[in-house]
Amino acid sequence: MTIIANPGLERRLKSENTGEVLFDGFTRARYATDASSYQIMPLGVVVPKTVDQAERAMAVARAEGVTVLPRGGGTSQCGQTVNQSLVIDCSKYLNAILVLDAAEKRCIVEPGIVLDELNRQLKPHGLWFPVDVSTASRATIGGMTGNNSCGTRSLRYGTTRDNIYSVDAVLPDGTPAHFGAVSADLSELAPDSPLRPIAKSLLALGEREADEIAARFPKVQRRVGGYNIDEFVPKNTKHNLAHILVGSEGTLAFTTKVELKLWPVLGKRLVGVCHFGQFYEAMNAAQHLVKLRPIAVELIDKTMLDLARAIPLFRSTIEKFVREEPEAILLVEFDEGADENARRMSELVELMGDLGFSWDKIGAKWGGVVEVADPALQTAIADVRASGLNIMMSMKDERKPVSFIEDCAVPLEHLAEYTDKLTQVFEKYGTRGTWYAHASVGCLHVRPVLNLKLEKDLKAMRAIAEEAFALVRQFKGSHSGEHGDAYRARLRRGEGAVRSQHGVQSGQDRRRAEIRRSRLFALRPRIRRLRYEAGAGLVGISGRRFRFPGRRRDVQQQRRL
Ligand SMILES: Cc1cc2nc3c(=O)[nH]c(=O)nc-3n(C[C@H](O)[C@H](O)[C@H](O)COP(=O)(O)OP(=O)(O)OC[C@H]3O[C@@H](n4cnc5c(N)ncnc54)[C@H](O)[C@@H]3O)c2cc1C
């Protein structure tokens, strides 16, 4: 990777008190990656100690004509936090709880606070922020807002979007603004509010595109791709302007404060471990199990169970809750108080019987429920599930489970057929998939097992992506139910589903133009990404990381800075 310094920018950032300014090759190389397959060297990194310093860094970037890329824990899987930009890392210092109103179950936090740390501080008040992402020990609220992250229990609590009251942010021109709920007449905004023109154009966009949004946006809870313009269609309740920032992946404004909706901490739970003799049967059962209104239904497939058994850390846990050799299990969790939990557990056992499962049978209809009431075992099981990625990656094979279609979501009634057809796609390309995660909302982490050192598997990767997204379109699902867009949008090139999902002509493209006109788009990283998307797509692959068309041009531009 070419390392290009930018001494002018660095000098200015240092002289204008912007916090830690890091332009050395080692630091830039560290920030050139996140949890995705992408790698792009940033211009440099600023770690501000205060919001004022972050704003000063943005002002310098503006003056120098370079793009800004906000970053939290850097756990994004689609390259959201890598670009040839000035990275502003919020995670080290911008991590305070600014206001806590326990009675009203609200708090205002800085963007860099890590979810586990927030919940640790909320626990004495009997509260938590329930968007329980697997990366809770790293993920920041700013990053969760940027990605509209979703937790294991999204069936009960929704996504980050559903749990945010307002966002304070700095617009690309340096203007601070409060994005909160407004009526259609914008009476809450002062006449000279910088948000007035933006809100007006968003509401106009929502009104004009209402039919298209109703027709084309997938009707699944897990849809985090694109911008949340559905918030702005005409309705009787207020429109929350914060929703345009939630899921915008740092492309519209720099978040300085987030006002969160808090919930009472979980009570004593009861978990039913539903066993299945066939994967298809488990997928088909999910739509019925959610009718018992559990707070989560999580899948673990046989591959993950077998791999976990081989890991000493997890072996004894697996032995305690898994009976015999299921092809898949669904962890069904209730949190309704002791009596109601017990009642629903009986219903679960009955339902599994009604669906034809019994421990006495063999084959597809073998199965039943193992009840787990012990909180310590429940925590151990949750740890196994949350370690899904690590467990899958322990596969001792040249081939590894590769993430590129792993958060598609389809309506539950199609989950069995979708997974079956996707399995056939994998077989066509000589591979198989590993499966786990959020069966409750039709969003499964599926990874085809591939060896990306082989040309044939690289080709298979591309083909599988295209065929998987075609299936998602067929079942009216969402291409991204968890991990977002960023550079991954290019993998959907030519498939049309993603674009049509948000409106080919009048949706995404017009929306882009509209937002650009309203100057929301002035933080340029996303524009650059979109330009790439419209271009030739991938032009080459270096190791496991992708290179992008235009990169060379960008490098030359950068040299001129
Ligand atoms: C193993 C693994 C498991 C995962 N499990 C889940 C899961 O269960 N659920 C889920 O939803 N996701 C999951 N993810 C994805 C990722 O962890 C989440 O999206 C997480 O919430 C991102 O938080 P972060 O702090 O790392 O954000 P980052 O990756 O640092 O940033 C995310 C986005 O937010 C933007 N951003 C950050 N700070 C600001 C700011 N101050 N202003 C404006 N924009 C900002 C960034 O520019 C970027 O676009 C997983 C990832 C991995 C690797």
Image: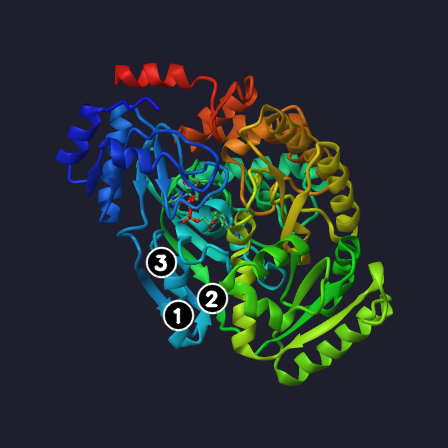
Task: Determine crowd level at label 1: few under 14, some 14-19, many 20+ residues with C-alpha closer than 10 A.
Answer: many
Ligand 1 within 8 Å of disc 2? The answer is: no
Cα separation, mark 1 vs mark 2, equals 9 Å
Cα separation, mark 3 vs mark 1, equals 12 Å
Give 383 or 264, whichever is nearer the viewer. 383
Q: Which mark is residue 380?
A: none
Q: Which mark is residue 122?
A: 1
Question: Callout 3, which amino acid?
Answer: Val
Question: Callout 2, which amino acid?
Answer: Leu
Would you name the residue on which mark 2 appears? 262
Give 317 or 445, whichever is nearer the viewer. 317
Give 196 or 71, whichever is nearer the viewer. 71
Task: Determine crowd level at label 3: few under 14, some 14-19, many 20+ residues with C-alpha closer than 10 A.
Answer: many
- Of pointers 1 and 2, the one earlier in the residue sequence: 1
Residue 432: quarter of image: top right
Q: Is residue 225 left or right of residue 114?
A: right
Q: Is residue 270 left or right of residue 130?
A: right
